[in-house]
Amino acid sequence: MVLSKITTGIREVTVSNSTPDLISNTKENINTERIRLILVNTSTGGQTIRIGIDSEPTSGIGIPLYPGGSITWEKTNPSFPIMQKMVYALSSAVGGTLSIYEEVVI
């Protein structure tokens, strides 16, 4: 079996402010491993985006990502063991946007 590195590049998504969006999921595919995930809050209207790891965030629960803020998870950093988990996002108001960069190995 040959492992191939797949880079999904950067994608921009509009994040709901009423129902958490599933933005990344490698948990259900046992042949896929996330090696890097970078999230950037690109909202222009002051929206905070909450991130949930394996659970849906709410308006007060989740990792807050403020406008212009970013967070990076890498396989080499054991402090952030999210490599096989679902990642959700929820915006504090309508129009929140998130840029997502993800690398996976299949």
Image (tube, grey):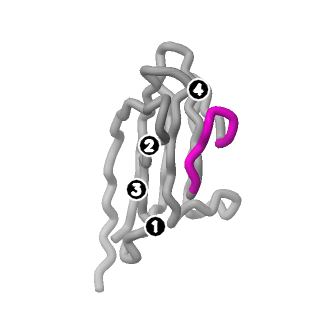
- Residue that protrudes farthest toward the front in the picture: 18
Q: Is residue 1 left or right of residue 57?
A: left
Q: Earlier in the sequence, mark 1 or mark 3?
A: 1
Q: Which mark is residue 21?
A: 2
Element on which disc 3 rests: strand
Magenta stretch, residue numbers = 55-62
Labels 4, 2: front one: 2
> Per the image, is 60 magenta?
yes
* Residue 39 percent across, percent down from the top left: 50, 40
* Residue 69 percent across, percent down from the top left: 59, 29
- Residue under the image location 33 percent in, 76 percent down: 3
Which residue lies under the disc numbered 3?
A: 103
Per the model, the C-alpha gap separating discs 3 and 4 is 24 Å
Type of residue at label 3? Glu
Which residue lies under the disc numbered 1?
A: 27
- Specify few, some or many for label 1: CA neighbours under 10 Å numbering under 14, 14-19, or 20 or more: some
Q: Is residue 102 left or right of residue 40?
A: left
Mark 4 vs 2: CB contact within 8 A: no
Q: Earlier in the sequence, mark 4 or mark 1?
A: 1
Labels 2, 3: front one: 2
